Image: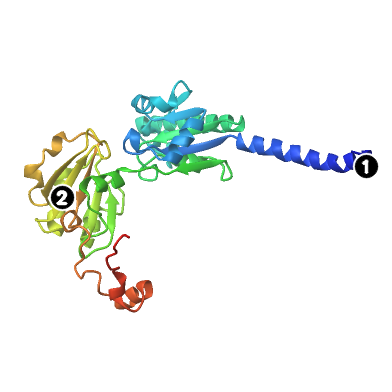
Amino acid sequence: MSKVDRRKWVPLICIFWFLLLAGSALAGGGKFYIVGMGSSPDLVTLRGLETVKQADIFILEEKSDLEAWKQWIGDKPVWYLGHISRVFYGVDPQTLKDPKKRAMAIRNAEARKEIIAKIREAVDQGKKVAALQWGDPMMYGTTFYLEMLPKDFPAEIIPGIGAFQASSAAVKMSPPYGWDTSSVILTMTDWPGRKDKNKELMKHKTSMVFYTMKLDYPGLFEQLKENYPKATPVAVVLYAGDREKEKVLRSTVGRFLKEIDYQNLPHEMHMLLVGKFLTVGQARKEGTTTHHKFIKQQHGDDPGGMIPGPTSGK
């Protein structure tokens, strides 16, 4: 190769190495993840598991979380930030007159700021930090991290299989199919100051799924009896998604308080499902044959053409 030819190749070689090194740096860059780990350790998604394997540091809420996910965490560093850290989030501690509440608000605010500072430092150093959470983090999970970090901070939420999906699978019925309704209300116990009281939500008489933290069963079922027929089916799913522990208890709105030992249900490890979907399955009141205009738009002019004929399989 002549000197002239070599001079032509030098810029191309430089560009090649620049792109290669830049790509390596980008691939190994730091990032913060919130990972939904599913309602059971074996329900983590492939994307979630791959993220966990690549993580350098983990954030957990409880010591028991480490036992559940030890096989993937191994001996990597773990930081803890309890679920209680969310208490008083969004409230200025100085506006609280009660000294005990004000002190707690200050402690939690400091804990949140500390973990955010640690996340930023680690990611700036090129490390991957993963906050692992049960179920799906978008359902009552801890996501304030992203609200406290800069908007352009490298971060990602990995969705998980939550208790709603796992409970629906356990009862083998799809909540949106409510015979004469097409919606599902996901809710929890009434909280002081909240506008969406369960009694008001029940007026829609659609399928309801309750996350049961601190749920007042007697009070709730008095409200249900006012809005749903007493024969409306009810199911409690214990340890949703856990193949060894999962259990389904069935009753009705009228008989639940007498038939189910609700006072001894596992704390925060069960879900309450209410609605006709539990017995009617995917059947619809009108067999989905009404609203012809919609059907024509979606499936063509001939509703009969919606149903494929049998095939020989040959």
> Which label was assigned to residue 273?
none
Q: Secondary structure at mark 2?
A: strand
> Which label was assigned to residue 4?
1
What is the crowding at mark 1: few (fewer than 14 residues within 10 Å), some, or many (at least 20)? few
Q: Which residue is mark 2?
A: 234
Q: Residue at x 35, y 36 (%)?
A: 134
Q: Residue at x 22, y 52 (%)?
A: 173
From the viewer's perspective, is residue 57 above or below residue 259? Answer: above
Q: Quadrant of residue 182?
A: bottom left
Pick the front one: 168 or 253: 168
* Name of the residue lying farthest toward the top: 75
Pick the front one: 313 or 129: 313
Q: Quadrant of the N terminus?
A: top right
> Comparing marks 2 and 1, which lies closer to the viewer?
1
Amino acid at the residue labelled 2: Val
Disc on the earlier residue, 2 or 1? 1
Q: Quadrant of the C terminus?
A: bottom left
Pick the front one: 171 or 32: 171
Distance (Cα) linking label 2 and label 1: 83 Å
Q: Quadrant of residue 282?
A: bottom left
Instruction: State left or right for residue 257 relative to residue 133.
Output: left
